[in-house]
Every structure is written in C-alpha cells, then in structure tokens.
Image (cartoon, coloured by chain):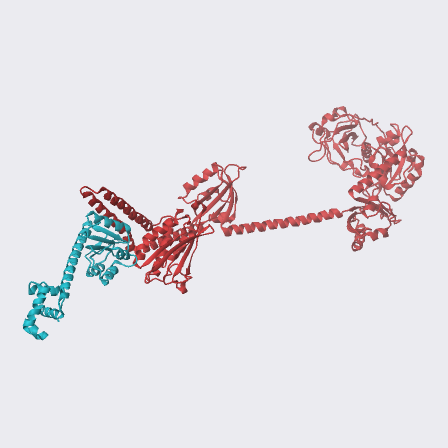
Amino acid sequence: MKSANVPTVFIIDDDSGMRQSIQDLVESVGLRAESFATGEEFLSKRRTGDPSCLVLDVRLPEMSGLDFQRQLADTDIQIPIIFITAHGDISMSVRALKSGAVEFLTKPFRDQDLLDASQQALLRDRAARKQQAEVRDLKDRYHTLSPREREVMTLVVSGLLNKQIAYEIGATEATVKIHRGHVMQKMQAGSIVELVRMADKLKLCTP
Amino acid sequence: MPELDSVHTLSLRAALTRGAQPVLAGDIIAGFVPRISLSILCCTSRITSRPKSASGAYLVRRLVIVELSFGDYLRLRVFSVGVSETRYQPLQLTPRWGLKAGAYRYKFPVASSPDFGFRLAADHLQPDDMTDYADSTHELSPLQTELQVALNLIPTHTWYANASGAVIFVNERGSDYLGLSKAHHLRCGIEIGATWDSHLAFLHADDHEETRRVWSGCLGNGAAGQMCFRVRDAAGEYHWFLSRVEPVWASNGTLLHWIEINLGIEDSKEAEFYLAEDRPATMPTSLSMYRDLQESKSRLEEAQRVAHVGHWEWDLETDAVIWSDETYRIFGLNPQELPMDLAAVRSMVHPDDRESLYQGVDEDLIAGVRPDAEFRIVLPSGEVRTVHALTSKRWSTVAGDSKRDATGQPYKLFGTVQDITERRRTEEDLQRTKIDLSEVTQELRREQAYLADAQSLAHIGSWACNFLTGKIFHLSDETFRLYGFDPAQGPIPFQSLYNATHPEDEPALREKFYGAIHSRSDYDLEYRICRPDGTIRFLRSLGHHNPSQEIGEYIGLTMDITEQKHAEQERERLHQLEADLAHINRLNMMGELTAALAHEIKQPIAASITSANACLRWLIHDPPNLERARAAAARMERESSRASDVINTLRSFYKKGLPPERRVVDVKEIVREMTVLLRNEAVRYSITIKCELDADTPNILGDPVQLQQVFMNLMLNAIEAMKDTGGELTIRSCLNRGKQLTISVSDTGVGLPAESIERMFDAFHTTKPQGTGMGLAITRSIVESHGGRVWATPNQGAGATFHFTLPVEAEARA
C-alpha cells in the first residue's frame, strides 16, 4: 500500500496504448499512477485523500475532456488537470487553461513536459490542499465565536476603532474591548494584522 | 439414176500407194440397193494417161470402185475397164497397173476414219474373185456399160430391163445363180428382143401368175413394185426371193429402163421385216420360211413392246385398219382384242385433240409432208395418255408408209404410234427441274447479293489467296472497299494490299503473319492500314489455313474495327476518368478526414514515444528496472506497428491509377481498418461505431482498395447524416444462401431525402454543400464491377441503411 502522502497521477484516455504509456512514464519517476478509459470510471474509482492530478485526453468517446473539466468544477471536485490532445487548437487550449488547467500538451509530447506539468500540478494540489486545511481550521475557530464576537471581528478587520464599533453595535467601548479580546483569543490571532489575514481567508466581508 | 460420169475422179493407184483414202464420195446408187448395205460408195477414177492401143486408138481407162459394207467388214470391188475414146469398149487392163484386169474383191477391216470414208490398208488387199470379161463386139452405150459394171458390184441378184420390160442384163451373181453360160446374152447385157415376161421362165410355176400381175401393174403404171417368188438355181432348186422393181426415168421424163433387185430371203434376215410387214399370213408353204417369219414377227412385236412403239396400217381403199399388238396395248386393249376401224380409232382420241389431229394430218398429206402428230388418247379405263404418231409417206415397200396408186394418191397410210406419256412427264419434270435450277440460281444470286450487302454493312470482307505466291483466288467487293479500292477497277495485286499496312504495324504484322504461314496455323491479327486517300483504319484479319491446301494458302475474313477501336479507346478513357474520379473521391474523403486521420496516426506514435521515454527512465534507475523497461519496449513496438498499419491503409487510398486487382479479401479486416480510420471522426460528432458482422462472414474476391473505398463512402455518409445529432453507426453482414454476402451500413441520422432517393446513386447528385456527388456513384460503380448491387432503405426509426451485395466465390471461401 502506498502511503497516504504519495501523490497520485490519474490518467483518463480512451486509447489504451496511450493510457498505459503515460501511466508507465509516471510510475518510472516514482509517482503513483492510475488510469481510466472514461471519466465515469475515474469518478467511481478515484482515491481522494492524497495529492493528485489528472492527465485528461481532450477527445473522449462520450464526453469531451473539456466538458468533463466543467463537470468536475460544477461538482466541486478540485483536481489540477493536464490536458493532452492529438490535435489541439489555440481556442481549445485557451478555453482549457482559462478553466484552470495546469497545462495543455499536444501529442506526441516530451516526457519531461508531462512530468513537469504533473509535478507542478501536484504541488498546486498540495498547496490547495494545505490552504483548504487552514481555512477549515480557521472556520472551526470562527465557529467557536458568539454571534456578537463574529460581529465585532468583522468590524475590527474592516479597520474601525473601538469607539466606532461600540457605536455601531450600540454597546460601550469597554464591552467592545472585551469582545475584541475574546475574538483575538479564540481565533488565536497574535495581532490585528494576523486577524485581518484570517478574515480574508475566511472571506469575511465587510458588511 | 445418176450418171457415173459425173462422179469424182481419182487416181486409185496413187491413193493406194499413199495409203490414203482411196475413195471419194460418189453418188450413191442406193436407189436400187436396198438396206443390205450400210454404205455404198461409188467412184470412178479417170486415168489421165492415154496409152495407145494396138489399133492405135487412145484409150481412156476408168476405175470404178463400189464399196459395200456389211457390219464390221467392207467388201470392196475394184473394177477396171478400159474403153476407147471412140468406141467405149471394155478393155483389159494391162499388168503394169499392178492390178489385174477384171473385178477384184477385197476383204479388210473397216477402220473408221476421222473424216470421211475408209482407210485402206494395202496389206489387206487380196484378190478374191476374178471374172473374165470377154471382149464383145456388141456395142454398148457408155451408160449401159457403167450400169452393168455397177450392177455386177452388187452382192445380190439384180437385173435390168428395157422400157418395155424385157430383161436385158442379169448381174454376175444372178447369172451365176441361174447358171448362165459366160457368153449368155443376159450376162453380157445384149438385147435380143425378148418379151416383158421372158424371165418368168426362171421362176417357180406357182409364182408366175402373181409375178405377172405385179410386173404388168408396174409396167402399166410406171410405178415401183414388189413381189416374192421362187427362183430356180443352176442345180434346179428353187429359193425364195424378195423382189423389188423400180423404173428409171431420164431427165426428159422418158422411161429409160427398169431395175430389179432380188434378195434371197431365205438367208437374209433383213428381208423378213418387210415380209412380215407385207404378208403376214399369206406366206408360201416353206416351213423354214414360215418359222423364220414367225420368229421375226415375234421379235418385231417384242421390240415394239419394249420400245412402246406400235404400228398401224390404214388401207385407204378398204378403210381397213390393221394394228400391231403393241398398238392395241398402247390404246389400253388386249392385242387383237377386236377388229379396228376408223370410227373406233377416232373415238379413242381425246375429244379435245380429235379435230386438230385429223385436220393436221389431212393438211400434211395434201402438202406432201409426213404427218407428225402428238395427241392424247383416252383408254377404256378412262386414263388419259399422250401418244406420238408418225404417218410418213413412203413410196417403197421397205421404208414406205403410204402406198400410192397409179394416180399418185396414197392408197395406204402406214405409221407408228408411241406412248410418250412418261417421256412427256419426264420432259416436264426436266423442265420443272430447269425452272427449279433457275430458281436455285436466282436464289444463289440473291444470297450472294445478301452476302455482299451483309459484308458491306458489317464492313467484313472475305478473301482467299496464297500469301507465299501472292496469288489471289477471291476478293470480295467489301475487301476492296476496306482497303479503299473500287471493286469495279478489277483485280489488284496482293502486294498493293500488303503495302497498305501502316509502317508502324508492319514489322510486328510480318513476324506474326509469316510465323502463322510457316507453322500452317490459323491467325488472328489486328493492324492499321493507310488507305490510298490517306485515312488510317484499324483492320482485324482472321485467316484459316486448310492443311489440305498448299502452304501459304489461306481463306479468311478481314473486318474494319476502326469504330470498335475508337470505342475501345473511348471506353479506356472513361475507365481512366472513372478511376481518376474514384481517386479524387478518395482524396476528398481523406481531406474530410485529415484531422481524424492525423489523430489516428499521432495517437500510436505519441504512445510509442511516451513508452520509449518510460523505457529509458526505467533503465536509468539504479539498478535499472529491466522488467518495466522490457514491457515499455514491447508497447513501443506495438504502438509503432499500429501507426504503420494505419499509414499503409491510408497510402493505398492515396495511390492513383492502380489497376483493379482481384484477390481474396477479408471483409472483416476491411471493416476493422475503416472503423479505425473513422473512429476519431465519429467520436468528434459523438457517433458510436458498432460492428455486428456475422462470425461466418466469408472472404470474397475483390479489389481491397476499392472495397475500402465503398466502406469509407458509406460510413462517411452515415457520419455525415448524424453530424448534428450524434448517433449510432452499425455495420452488419449476412450470408444469403451461401452465395451472396450482404453488408449493410445503418445510421440513426436524418434519413433519406424522399425526393431524391432514386437519384442518389447518380453521378453529381449531392445534398451536401461541399459534396462532389461522386461518392455514391463511385460506390455503385465499384460494387457493380464486383458483381454486386447497392441500394438504400429508410430505417423503421431514424436514419437510413445502405446495403450492398458481393458474390461469394467458391475459391475465395477456401
């Protein structure tokens, strides 16, 4: 069994020769690889825990690679995608890249290009995963705040003074100071700047 | 009676010496020598030299030759007489003539001469008989002398009498028979004033009365007569003779004398005919004669029956009609069944012919010509037959047919009647045959004309000739025309025909041509000729050599195949055009498929390259992962082959002008290839390709590229029909009765345009904006060239199905 940390490269190509070749290539550099003939197969069998990326053939029998990319996005499955195609055109690659593809490679491609793209995608996935973990942690902290505290936090990160906040929420300046202390404590923020960054990550908007 | 003086002269001696014909045609004395001889020639030869006699008078010598022939032998008597110019006395011939005086009889075979007369071979001349001619003081006229000479030559008994009927001279044979002395006055022809009936003394007493009656009748009428009597010979025995007496008239109408010839009818067969004719039942009592007569009569009857000739006699005085047995038979009666009379005869003549017959006979008799009539008779059985009757006038009893009384009117008519029904029929048949023949000839001419027309229409000429000798036996008019000659100009030499050969074709032609001649085999050649007017024509010549004929002798046909050649060239051009179009069609298809095909090639190549890279990476591991490297290399090889296969399939499509070939083709393999080629194109439009080929789908004989093209066309059409909707393309196959493979290509697209379903296979018919309209036309052309057919049907649901058939060859299945 591979360790949970080993990143995995998923491959979807209807051409078995191509599929196997890419899998072999990826494996030769010590990465895990799994290949599927169709998107459906991928969706039903993929493992989600590890950092991973997807090598996706643009032309697939039932649903094109680009459509599959959209479907993934729609269902909030985030995985970095490297497109490969035998005859890509510019509009197709622009569309793919705009939709967040890591790379758009034309067959036959240089092996290093694919491997680089894969590494890059995995890094990106890794980064994405880390960010997602941070946000998840912040959210957990944020959920410990009382509604008045969340209100105060939002006003703090928006740059208002205590006096102003007190005015806004109809409380005394001292009360504000107490809430503000709770927020800083619960959010484990060392400074106001840090708290602002947290709020940013939590996408808290200034009301 | 012609005078002997008037006959031709000839030197007999000279003739004999030369061995040439010694005789000339003299006047024939047939008048008093009846049918005994076949030919009687008489000639005199006047010797021009005039030797002096002892008395000093010049003599004229004459040679008289009378030839009498009997059967194969000729009896020749040479009689020589010398008469003085003044006295005309018979003189002896002198020995220096080489012929003894007197008469000689020679026997020799008759050799027929090419022209006239007989060739005498001198070796055969043999003195036979010599009669001494005593000198006589009695003065004879030259005519008498020569008459006596002539009569002496006749090998039967004859005599002559003066105008009053007294016998004056009996010829040698007669005299000998009678036993007259050498100096007897009758032998020498000296008139002693005898009476008209003095000669009766020599006759049998029983015959005197009859003889006297006939003889006196002759004298009274001056007419010829005939009688039979017995004559006493030297030994005193009597023998039967048939006697015929004729008057001899001078040119001035006076009666000169009478000449009588007696035929010994006891030993002369010929005489029996005349006897039988004249006196059938009244012959005297001699038994042998009677037997002879009966015999000869029965022969006559037999001869008549065989010849279908009967004779009849009508006595004008008594109106009695006598018929021979055969005449009765001809008229459908039994011989001598009933007595005949004129009325009976008349009643048997066909009514339609009756009047014209009798009228014609009367007219002929009056005009003095022999009636010769052909008429029909009606037999008692009712049968109608055609007979031919001759009623000629004959004045002698022997050959005569009518007997004339003293007034010159015939008192008896004699004639023959012959049944000529069969002959007439034969003649008619012959006539018909002639008509038939002429019809056949006409038919042949017509056929010939038809043949000539046919040759002219078909531009086929016939000929027969010997190529080695250049001799032409036959050259039909059309052959002339094929070579641009006018048939009316007459024969043309072989060389001028051969020289017409186009110079470019001549060497090859000559080689094949002489090869055929020397191997004596038939040939079939095509070549061009340049006609005299400069036009070039293609000819095909078929020659047949008959082994029984001489080497080089051929008969054959030559035909103008110019139009055919042009048509062939045109067809060739069309084929080329079609092939070009098919090629363009393929290029077009390839053009349409470029992207898909590129993908189809790139895919395995990319896979191969990627595998190669993986392989290298497995190798640079430390230690190298050889197992994974080997697997990658194997994949590499597999993918490269895949690319190569696709390229090969495509290359055949791009090739141009390959002649169609027939080889065993695996239909499943072709379908597979085409599915590969078109897969990406189908994917592009969300089309699925399904193959439902019968597992037993047999191989067929065909051209692989053409069949690929058929599949490609139909599959592309199907894809085209589903471009906007996506769908399913299904290829099915099934085997019908083991003989025919039916393949269908179905789509679920827009379906067939109803208004053009019938024209969809026509060339240039298209429903696509960019279509050439050639796809289906070429598909049909290819399928039909493989012996199949192609058609389309709408589907139950959406879309259409195109079907085509291919015959399954036994050999392809094996």
Residue B588 pos. (x, y %): 32, 56
Judge left or right: residue B772 versus residue A65: right
**Image quarter of residue B723:** bottom left
**Image quarter of residue B141:** top right
Residue B390 vs residue A37, the one in the foreground = A37
Question: What hue does chain B carry in this figure?
Answer: red
| Residue B385 visible at all | yes
Tell me the residue at 15%/63% (across/down). Answer: A140
- Numbered disc total: 0
The quarter in which the C terminus of chain B is drawn is: top left
Residue B659 vs residue B641, the one in the foreground = B641
- Say above or below: B212 vs A90: above
Judge left or right: residue A45 versus residue B46: left
Residue B206 pos. (x, y %): 94, 36
Residue A143 pos. (x, y %): 15, 66
| Residue B587 visible at all | no
Judge left or right: residue B119 versus residue B459: right
Question: What hue does chain A carry in this figure?
Answer: cyan
Residue B121 pos. (x, y %): 71, 28
Residue B100 vs residue A10, the one in the foreground = A10
Q: List the single residue furthest toward the top.
A: B95
- Say above or below: B210 vs B453: above
Tell me the residue at 39%/64% (across/down). Answer: B753
The quarter in which the N terminus of chain B is drawn is: top right
- Say above or below: B296 vs B392: above
